[in-house]
Image (cartoon, rainbow, N blue to C red):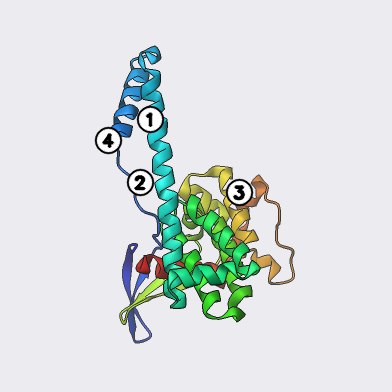
Amino acid sequence: MGSGKRIQGDGEQYWEMEPDFEPLPDQVGTGDGAKAVLAVGGAALAGDVSGVSVPTAVALLESWREKFQKHQVRRREDLVRAASKESSIDPEEAIRRIADDDRLTFLALEALEAASRTRLDSKAAALGRSLGKILQDDARIDKESIWIRILSVIEPPHIRVLQYFVIGRKLRVGGTHWTPKGDVSVRTVSEGLGLEDAVLLLIQDLLRCGLVINPGGVDGGTPETVYTPDSLNEVLRATQLGAELFRRLELAAEES
């Protein structure tokens, strides 16, 4: 998972890792949907859009709809399996317990909605693990409901931003220890990802979720709540929640 370099220190050897939770995009295949894409694309390049038949265009849209529906089902199944495994309860019993508790029902619906539309592979399983923790111990509902809310927001672009603020050390004995890197300029992130001012929307999400903070707030200052272009010059740092997010996604990825 990820790439890194070997570090030696404090009597322990570890790998300094970059977080990597996003799969490569699907390659164009040779099925009906792909043929429709090539037909539409070829006609457009040739400047002859009129040559694309309505049935071809409909076949293309239909293939996309079917693929998305299968994606939704697969993500929901990932969530239920993870909840069942985390709680050591079979799926049918887990669903029954969720249905019998209004609090769990609302949380499960929020988690299912987030899982069905995500592009982040390990997110569905991470959401399921949070539900499983609650099923295992009701006292965890406050903490895990917060994590369900955080995970509902996070998508691959947020991960690419947050990885500028978090570092993982792969220990020789196994496992990864995720920690905040320290202060990082928003401009550094923006230039590194080529997002320009658009990075500020992602930064706002990370701030609202408590995954990064404005260090000024620690010393009595007032953290920014609404970002403007001048905010590219701000310096932020990851919180322990930010580091914990990577740990949760890594564990979910290993089990899914």
The reply to whether discs 2 and 3 touch (Cβ–Cβ < 8 Å) is no
Quote the CA–CA distance across marks 3 and 1.
32 Å
Residue situated in front as seen by the camera: 51 or 174: 51
Residue under label 2, please give it: 25
Q: Residue at x 60, y 62 (%)?
A: 149
Q: Quadrant of residue 197?
A: top right
Q: Is residue 196 shown above or below 171?
A: above
Residue situated in front as seen by the camera: 39 or 96: 96
First-in-chain label (2 vs 4): 2
Q: For marks 2 and 1, give the one nearer the viewer.
A: 1
Q: Position of residue 86 (x, y in %)?
A: 45, 75
Q: Which disc is residue 201 wearing? A: 3
Residue under label 1, please give it: 60
First-in-chain label (4 vs 1): 4
The reply to whether discs 2 and 4 touch (Cβ–Cβ < 8 Å) is no
- Disc 4 residue type? Gly
- Disc 1 residue type? Leu
Quote the CA–CA distance across marks 4 and 1.
10 Å
Q: Residue at x 63, y 60 (%)?
A: 207
For the residue carrying disc 2, how many other residues have a C-alpha within 10 Å: few (<14), some (14-19), or many (20+)? few
Q: Residue at x 57, y 59 (%)?
A: 109
In the displayed structure image, the side of residue 26 where residue 225 appears, left or right: right
- Disc 2 residue type? Pro
Q: Position of residue 218 (x, y in %)?
A: 68, 71
Quote the CA–CA distance across marks 4 and 3.
37 Å
Residue under label 4, please give it: 31
Q: Is residue 118 shown above or below 37?
A: below
- Disc 3 residue type? Leu
First-in-chain label (2 vs 3): 2
